Amino acid sequence: MNSKRKLFFIMALAASGSAMAHPGHAEGAVAGLMHPLTGLDHILAMVAVGLWAAQLGGRAQWLLPASFVGFLAMGGVLGASGFVLPMAEAGIVTSVLLLGLLVGFAVKLKTAPAALAVGVFALCHGYAHGVEMPAMGSGLLYGLGFVAASAALHASGLGLARAVQARGNWLRAAGAAISLAGVWLGLAA
């Protein structure tokens, strides 16, 4: 089975009703896996990280997602510990808008500053995941779940970018769409 089919199979399995023995009472890794997949803001930002990493190429293809995942985990710990991160929701919406613009305009940054930028965005996303962690169940398993789902979304962005890069401006159009969604999310908040 090729890697795209494996990723699709894992995501389909995680999203299936049978993955949750007691719907509405998901705990641990299942709750963590599902959380990033239940918010358009999270999905768009994490896919956009993969898209931008592919545009930058080279080391950025693994360093940007790795930076996001690392800072995401740190943000999750902050959120779960009761730390207050002011304007976290605004940071999440802003991340969607800015990541869309970075992809839409095919902004070329050096890998280290790009990784730091996505890391800052990831702190906000991780914080939200940590704050919304279910009171029941294992925080570690929940954290591992949302980190795994986030990494899968980054991988899907990388795969999508590779699939459409040879087709003109599709990737830049995707960035524009993500940016517009960020504006809409900001107005809806």
Image (spheres, rainbow, N blue to C red):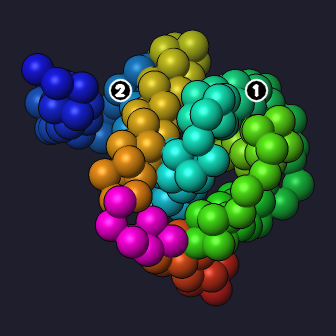
Provide the secondary structure element on which disc 2 rests: helix
In the rendered image, the quadrant that contains the N terminus is top left
Q: Nearer the viewer, residue 180 or 76?
A: 180
Locate residue 110: give its quadrant: top right
Q: Decide: is 99 above or below 141.
A: below
Q: Residues within 10 Å of mark 2 (few under 14, many from 20)?
A: many
- Reply above or below: 40 against 31: below
Q: CA distance from mark 1 to mark 2?
A: 20 Å
For label 1, count other residues whose C-alpha is less than 10 Å away and answer few (under 14), some (14-19) or many (20+): some
Which percent across, then down, holds residue 98?
71, 67
Give the residue at mark 2.
30
Q: Secondary structure at mark 1?
A: helix
Q: Residue at x 61, y 34 (%)?
A: 58
In the image, residue 166 lies at what x, y percent? Answer: 35, 60
Q: Nearer the viewer, residue 37 or 160?
A: 160
Q: Which image quarter: residue 184?
A: bottom right
Give the x, y percent position of residue 109: 78, 51
* Residue matched to label 1: 74
**Residue 189 appears in the rendering:** no
Res 172 visible: yes
- Left or right: residue 11 compared with residue 48: left
- Residue 168 on the magenta span: yes
Mark 1 vs mark 2: in front: 1
Left/right placement of residue 48 relative to residue 186 reads left
Range of residues picked out in magenta: 166-172
